[in-house]
Image (tube, rainbow, N blue to C red):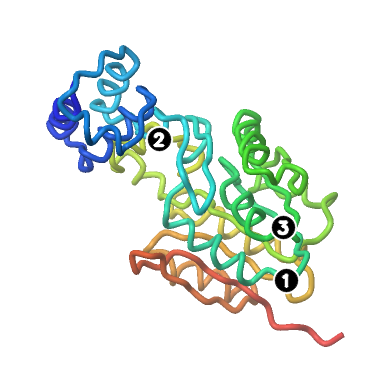
Amino acid sequence: MTYNEICIALADAGIENDRGEAAMLICHFCGINKADLMQRREESFENSNLDAAVIKRCSHYPLQYILGYWDFCHETYRVTQDTLIPRQDTEKLVELAIRMMPEKARLIDLCTGSGCIAISALAARPDCHAVAVDLFEKTLEVAGENAETNKVGDRIGFLKGNVLDPVFMETLGDFDCILSNPPYIETHQIPLLEEEVSFEPETALDGGDDGLDFYRVIIGQYGKYLRRGGFMLLEIGCDQGKAVAAIAAEAGYRCEIYKDYGGNDRVTYLTRPELPS
């Protein structure tokens, strides 16, 4: 198939960025760079793996899973169907963490998935250390590989644990910050999401009937593990700011909401008033 033929096939299947994705697929499976591709756009690339990948993408199987990797912040992450695909919206949370963490901070990343939040934060802050928690062994294996690939493996530990049942926290000590991109989609909305999302792990999406189950637990039960002056940074859905702020206020937190690069509410920054010594 030629570059133009792949573009047409993807466009006919309703893939919005058909040209960009065609280039990525050819470069990945044929081992050429984009500059070379622009000189070879009329060439037919005889590659069975490429042909299979185009067919798969036309079925709306995510490009990221086909490639097996995706860029996030300044790092590259292996992704599989055991991990949520890293998204640019989440980079705002990492940017805030990098800026706000105190020197030699100890952080915990809840629902770590690919590990992208904790790993990119550590990559930018070589003075810091982290613990990353997820419920599934296969997910943690991928996250561990990503930590090694991005050269922070000596500063992060991985733990299997159920974030909705934080008994595992009792043996971990305290932290300067709690970071999380928890599941926050309302259960009944999941079947209505775009087709690509249906291939991602549902457990990484499902936030319960109102999408707020994880916020109630994290905000309500994890604060006692924060050091004095510590904070939480939690990703939220673009329409969940008021609801999460209400949960935070009930638990005694100050709440600031930061917008993502698209101008949507995306990250809550939670702190508590300091109590007298």
Q: Amino acid at mark 3?
A: Pro
Could you tell me how far apart the alpha carbons at marks 3 and 1 are, in whole angstroms?
Answer: 12 Å
Q: Residue visible at 53% across and 62% down?
A: 93
**Dot 2: element:** helix
- Tag 1 near tag 2, CB within 8 Å: no
Is residue 73 or residue 196 the one in the foreground?
Answer: 73
Residue 154 percent location from the top left of the image: 77, 44
Q: Which residue is mark 2?
A: 64
Label ID, residue 262 = none
- Tell me where residue 31 sits by quadrant: top left
Sequence order check: which comes first, mark 3 or mark 1?
1
Q: Quadrant of residue 10?
A: top left
Front one among 206 and 77 = 77
Q: Quadrant of the C terminus?
A: bottom right
User: Which is closer to the viewer, label 2 or label 3?
Assistant: 3
Against 84, residue 94 (above or below) is below
The image position of residue 7, as x and y in percent, is 17, 32
Answer with left or right where residue 84 lies relative to residue 228: left
Q: Secondary structure at mark 1?
A: loop
Q: For residue 269, which quarter of the picture?
A: bottom right
Packing grade of label 2 (10 A; few <14, some 14-19, many >=20) is: some
Which residue, given by chain and number where applicable, does mark 1 sit on?
102
What's the amino acid at mark 1? Pro
Dot 1 or dot 2, earlier in sequence? 2
- 64 vs 168: above or below: above
Residue 2: x %, y % from top left: 18, 23
Label 2, label 3: how far apart the Cα atoms are: 28 Å
Query: Whole-Å distance between the Cαs marked 1 and 2?
Result: 34 Å
Residue named by callout 3: 126
Residue 228 position within the rendered picture, expressed as x and y whole percent measured from the top left = 78, 74
Q: Do the numbered discs 3 and 1 sit on residues whose CB atoms are within 8 Å? A: no
